[in-house]
């Protein structure tokens, strides 16, 4: 039994069941036992101790294309200097390291960029400092500097805690976590009448059937509000990539990964990565409410191809012909619909005075 499971069982015995959102928060971010506080989650295979692999670790091409996207946007927005280049939840720092390397072709971009990381984990901050020593760290986007700001976030929002509600005839019952036979199990809580924010209400599907699950994520909503407000005030844009749905949807997407496989999310709190799908229409709605413009939500595969993924793969192959098979398989992993290409979505939002964001083709709607 993990230490955190023991603690949660004792707390539940003393005080009763806890909300799913509190379970997820503790399992991921408990200061002593939380997953992101001590685990090294990322890795290519289960042999190096990682639990999952993200796009920046699949291929350098991911960060290079996003670096080119940022440098192009920075030029077209009038080359503000200095400007804030911020990343939400940078993990090991690979994405920003690849972005800065790619953007070296435009030395003025690199010189103008103040790099800011929003990261709560001390262990991951240390890893990020190793790869991107020039960064400044924040606990929340609320303290980003008052500068035109380009924000990126890859697999950040999926790591924030969610609360599930089950539709009942006369309201919604929150999903709770309780104890049974020395194990953690799900339970339904007492019915609530209107548990959702206005923003989430505006993004629910037209019909929600009895028994359907709706997921809400208060921390996702506040973080997006803060980021959108920052851009509305100081100018700039945000590029947010994650797995999730592009249209309003119901359903249980709460899941746990350990050693590159799915596991029971309640079995080993603190040792497994817990995530939920990101509600992209909700993120877009929050950005628009703050006065930003949102591009149509794109699929990752189409977005990366529009930015020149195939061309970059060709260039890399010419530079290292011996890596051709690897490079093609990285490209496939990032962009093929049956791999990360369709499940992962891209949201671009920008201040009203910004030029058009590249990569969001009409056919990706
Ligand atoms: N972007 C990286 C890592 C994704 S994992 C990649 O693509 O590989 C999620 C990241 O978000 C981790 O760095 C984690 O520590 C961070 N994180 C999780 N919750 C956070 C919070 N509430 N505030 C800031 N960072 C958080």
Image (tube, rainbow, N blue to C red):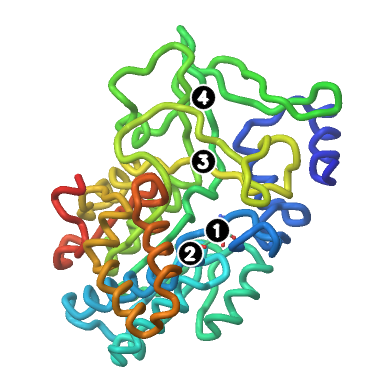
- Label 2: state its secondary structure: helix
Estimate the spatial distance between the alpha carbons at disc 2 and disc 3, rounded to whole Å. Answer: 21 Å
Mark 2 near mark 1, Cβ–Cβ under 8 Å? yes
Viewer-side label of 2, 4: 2
Residue 28: percent from the left, percent from the top?
A: 65, 50
126 in relation to 195, above or below:
below
| 2 and 4 marks in contact (CB < 8 Å) | no
Q: Secondary structure at mark 3?
A: loop
The residue labelled by disc 4 is 165
Residue that numbered label 2 is attached to: 58
Task: Answer with mark 2 or mark 3, whichever residue precedes in sequence.
Answer: 2
The structure residue drawn at horizontal position 22% and vertical position 76%, both measured from the top left corner, is 72
Residue with the mark numbered 3 = 276
Please identify the quadrant where the C terminus is shown: top left
Helix, strand or loop status at disc 1? loop
Looking at the picture, does residue 239 appear above or below residue 10?
below
Q: Is residue 186 left or right of residue 105?
A: right
Mark 4 vs 3, N-terminal side: 4
Sooner in the amino-acid sequence: mark 2 or mark 4: 2
Q: Secondary structure at mark 4?
A: strand
Residue at 68 percent across and 63 percent down: it is 40
Nearer the viewer's eye, disc 4 or disc 3? 3
Name the quadrant containing residue 239: bottom left
Front residue of 111 and 13: 111
What is the CA distance from the residue labelled 4 to the residue labelled 1? Answer: 30 Å
For the residues labelled 4 and 1, say whether their Cβ atoms are less than 8 Å apart: no
Q: How many marks?
A: 4
Q: Position of residue 138 (x, y in %)?
A: 53, 69
- Disc nearer the start of the sequence (3/1): 1
Mark 1, residue position: 53
């Amino acid at each position: 039994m993990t230490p955190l499971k023991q603690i949660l069982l004792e707390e539940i015995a003393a005080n009763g069941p806890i909300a799913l959102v509190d379970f997820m928060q503790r399992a991921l971010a408990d200061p002593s036992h939380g997953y992101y506080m001590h685990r090294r989650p990322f890795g290519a295979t289960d042999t190096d101790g990682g639990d999952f692999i993200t796009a920046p670790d699949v291929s350098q091409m991911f960060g290079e294309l996003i670096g080119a996207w940022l440098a192009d946007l920075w030029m077209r927005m009038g080359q503000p200097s200095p400007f804030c280049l911020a990343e939400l939840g940078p993990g090991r720092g690979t994405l920003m390291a690849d972005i800065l390397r790619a953007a070296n072709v435009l030395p003025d971009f690199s010189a103008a960029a103040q790099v800011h990381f929003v990261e709560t984990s001390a262990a991951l901050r240390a890893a990020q400092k190793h790869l991107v020593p020039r960064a400044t760290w924040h606990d929340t986007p609320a303290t980003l500097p008052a500068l035109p700001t380009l924000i990126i976030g890859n697999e950040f929002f999926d790591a924030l805690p969610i609360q599930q509600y089950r539709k009942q005839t006369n309201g919604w019952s929150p999903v709770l976590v309780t104890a049974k036979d020395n194990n953690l199990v799900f339970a339904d809580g007492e019915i609530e009448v209107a548990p959702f924010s206005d923003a989430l209400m505006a993004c629910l599907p037209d019909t929600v059937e009895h028994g359907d699950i709706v997921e809400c994520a208060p921390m996702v909503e506040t973080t997006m509000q803060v980021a959108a407000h920052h851009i509305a005030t100081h100018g700039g844009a945000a590029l947010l990539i994650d797995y999730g749905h592009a249209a309003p949807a119901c359903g249980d997407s709460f899941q746990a990964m350990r050693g590159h496989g799915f596991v029971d999310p309640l079995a080993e709190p603190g040792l497994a990565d817990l995530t939920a799908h990101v509600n992209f229409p909700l993120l877009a709605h929050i950005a628009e409410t703050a006065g930003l413009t949102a591009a149509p939500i794109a699929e990752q595969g189409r977005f990366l191809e529009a930015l020149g993924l195939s061309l970059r793969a060709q260039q890399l192959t010419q530079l290292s012909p011996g890596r051709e098979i690897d490079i093609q398989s990285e490209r496939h992993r990032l962009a093929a619909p049956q791999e990360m290409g369709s499940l992962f979505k891209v949201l671009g939002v920008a201040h009203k005075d910004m030029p058009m964001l590249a990569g969001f083709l009409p056919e990706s709607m």
